[in-house]
Image (cartoon, rainbow, N blue to C red):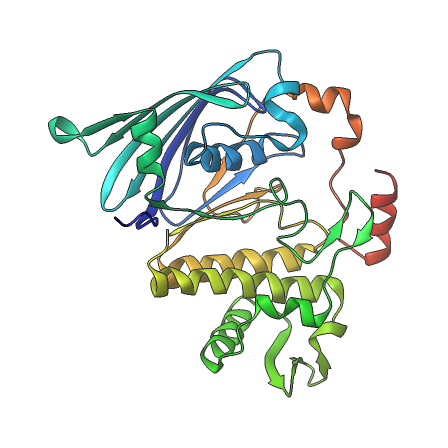
Amino acid sequence: MNREPNIPVTKIISAACRNFMAFEGLHNFEFDEAISTIVGKNSGGKTSLVVLIKQALDTDIGREWPGKWLVESHDYTESLIELKFVAGGKIHYLRRVISGNTTRDLHLYIGEGDKAEFLRDSEGFAYLKKLKPVTLFDTFWRPYKDYPKFNPYNKKLHFSEIDDSLSYIRPSAEYIDALNLLLLAAGSKISKLSVRGNSYVIENRNGTIVPLSSLALGDSSIVLTLAKFLMHAMAIDEEDNSRVILIDEMETGLSRSGVQVLFDGIRILANRYKCQFILTSRFSNGRINPITIKQPRVPKVYRTHRHLVVSNPPFSSFGKLGAWLSKL
């Protein structure tokens, strides 16, 4: 009997919740089939919506939340999350009731109309294990490990040396060519990446050639982040993976122009590989299909741990970002 996940999730249609993380009361959200941008201020609920999607599809009955969200963050003790999605060519509707850190009740409908299949609790969890996981880039489950950037919690630079960064970039000629086309189409100031011996080098548009490891933090972050997004997008077709990619907190420490390069790169990837991106941003201008988070409840964990509520980082120099981090 094949126990490996074998059903790819191809689209998230909508989500809803009641009393979940930053959301008090009932909230509903609908997503575009290509790109949806969750827009809101810091501590405004953007991550909560990303986690909602991830948690809805989680195969575990219990979940220990980073920061003890469901235990410390709210006055209420029970949460409801719902998700409508497409997997294996069928529409699915999932309803999950969470008490504390444990799912108390799970309903899953597969298909529509009279032919819909209904699974509950253990049968539902057994089915969820058949789904191939959606891809998540974030700083909630794995703080500052998904992006080569600053770690504001220890106020140190979290940028791997070139040897540790090779996992972001495939050495194959096909992949390097695809990455260079992506960087060019997204408007990056980097003209070309190539392999010389055991090292990666960058050719800038002004003709200068430098090692990838010597690039400025913002420029290297753009290259490595797009490289990682491309790697996962290419694997969708190669390995028949789920076509949903969730992205949270990719803007920190980047200039406005650098952020725009990433968004343009995501738009190109969504179109080329027919995948769905659901990502967060603090700004609505120029964002694709924005979903604005309005007036969510400020979680108790933010009210009692004020260091978790921070102002937006500066979109400027390395020095100004360091000064901003020193105030946390």
Q: Quadrant of residue 92?
A: top left
Q: Residue at x 65, y 21 (%)?
A: 299
Q: Is residue 290 left or right of residue 163?
A: left
Q: Residue at x 72, y 79 (%)?
A: 211
- Determine if residue 16 is in view: yes
| Residue 144 versus residue 220 in the image, above or below | above
Q: Looking at the figure, which quarter contains the C terminus?
A: top right
Q: Residue 174: x percent and y percent?
A: 45, 79
Badge count: 0
| Residue 134 versus residue 47 in the image, above or below | below
Q: Residue 272: x percent and y percent?
A: 38, 64
**In this view of the protein, which residue sits in the foreground, 29 or 225?**
225
| Residue 268 versus residue 145 in the image, above or below | below
Q: Is residue 176 left or right of residue 43?
A: left
Q: Residue at x 67, y 30 (%)?
A: 67
Q: Residue furthest front?
A: 1
Q: Residue 19: x percent and y percent?
A: 52, 17
Q: Is residue 317 left or right of residue 284?
A: right
| Residue 52 versus residue 298 in the image, above or below | below
Q: Quadrant of residue 77?
A: top right
Q: Residue 130: x percent and y percent?
A: 32, 43
